[in-house]
Amino acid sequence: MAGAAIYGDGTPDNKASLATGEHGLRGVHADDGKVAPGDIAVGVIIGRASEYFDFFVFAIASVLVFPAVFFPFESKLDGTLYAFLIFAFAFIARPFGTVAFMAIQRRLGREAKLTAALFLLGVSTAGIAFLPTYGELGFAAIVLLSLFRIGQGIALGGSWDGLPSLLALNAPPNKRGWYAMLGQLGAPLGFIVAAGLFSYLLMSLSHDEFLDWGWRYPFYVAFAINVVALFARLRLVSTNEYERLLEERELQPVPISEMSHTQGRNIIIGALAALASYALFHVVTVFPLSWISLYSPRDMSGFLVIQMIGAVLAAGGVVVSGVIADRLGRRTTLGTLATLIALFSWLVPSLMDGGDWGQNVFILLGFVLLGLSYGQAAGAVTANFTAKYRYTGAALTSDVAWLAGAAFAPLVALGLAAHFGLAYVSLYLLSGALGSLAALSLNRALEIRD
């Protein structure tokens, strides 16, 4: 799912290693057994895009499919809330996956860990595609859906490969923000593909055909994409040069007990520093889809197209965030965007209740803010980790950020809006922005410096 993050930090490397900048990794080539920065970037983007595609396929299905297929005995609202609860299971399971697969890596190596994690992700995703409905299997179908979702979360926790940190650590000092945003492009790319596929199916099939068999195709596609991502990433991690670079940068797992005891504060502050962005993530992607599905006569296929346009704008925002962060510093960038997200939160009721025009403005403006903030959200605390703890700290910070900011966002936002009004969604989003500002004020090591 969300997925693992890119960390462009400002701490110097204490090891004698390859220089950054013009002479960083530029002379290293994959075709002679070495790793070029372009190859690392491609591996990062492919890997993250595949994870986000899985993420959004499940999220969209939680709105359009699961209430009718797995919770037909409940109202559409309650069925959607139950589906969002199962959606959150992956984020709860993800830190456990990180811990378990770090242990596997220490015993069997990075290749075995990544292969096992992506195999579990593929099996869990394909399992959902073949899952019988509630009408065919009863309550057992809901249990299996939950188990497959937990499997996805464990697998995503285990899929951290160190590629983003390696890429960021070899960035020129004045380009760390730019390198930090590359993996974040996976989010809008994954959303565009997932939303486009569902939109096409909704336009091409009748309602009964879509709920009977059409919804399963995105999960088949997700399985195929996982296979491609597996080979793209294994092509890099299997090279001796890649392993050497990771060792020189000390990007190796450390025991979780040691990590928690010595670095727990950095993990928590880093996760909270990005809280505004992660909260906004679902408030402009999953929540509006559920609200429109329940309370608006709008065509869902057309609304997905609007969201796809928003995702294109978000991708542009991610790219721009790299330029801004390199000029202003990450802390200033994140703080400014958290403030803008706080202001944007007050527009939720008027725009979402403003008919098609207001909803479209909410989606497009929200996606722009999401791209600008999310582009740097993943690098929020790595500067605080020493080299020894950077690999494990990066993974756990991402896990905690997703759990705190995004896991229950669709469930909470829809529940609040449905029972108390859209104004409470504003307060929810505002709380995330204030949490980010508080964490940033406690941590002044986030500036991107030479």
Image: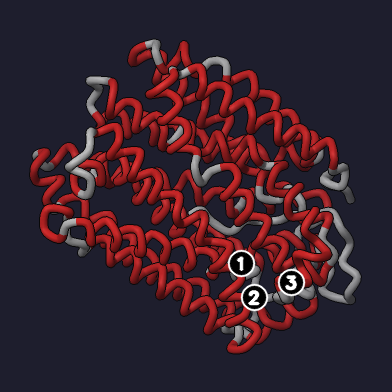
- In space, the residues marked 3 and 1 are separated at their CA atoms by 30 Å
Coloring scheme used = secondary structure
User: In terms of sequence position, does the residue under pointer 2 or pointer 3 come before the other?
Assistant: 2
Badge 2 vs badge 3, beta-carbon distance below 8 Å: no
Secondary element at image label 3? helix
Q: Position of residue 132 (x, y in %)?
A: 17, 60
Picture residue at 39% right of the left edge, 11% below the top: 354
Look at label 3 and name its amino acid: Ser
Secondary element at image label 1? helix
Picture residue at 50% right of the left edge, 38% below the top: 409
Residue at the disc numbered 1: 40
User: In terms of sequence position, does the residue under pointer 2 or pointer 1 come before the other?
Assistant: 2
Picture residue at 17% right of the left edge, 53% below the top: 134
Residue 348 versus residue 379 in the image, above or below:
above
Q: Is residue 357 in view from this perspective?
A: yes
Q: Position of residue 193 (x, y in %)?
A: 36, 48
Badge 2 vs badge 1, beta-carbon distance below 8 Å: yes
Look at label 1 and name its amino acid: Ile
Q: Mark 3 vs mark 1: give the one in front.
A: 3
User: In terms of sequence position, does the residue under pointer 3 or pointer 1 come before the other?
Assistant: 1
Residue 355 versus residue 96 in the image, above or below:
above
Q: Position of residue 3 (x, y in %)?
A: 53, 56
Q: Which mark is residue 35?
A: 2
Q: Is residue 317 left or right of residue 409?
A: right
Q: Tell me if mark 3 has few (under 14), some (14-19) or many (20+) residues whose alpha carbon lies within 10 angstroms of its own.
A: few
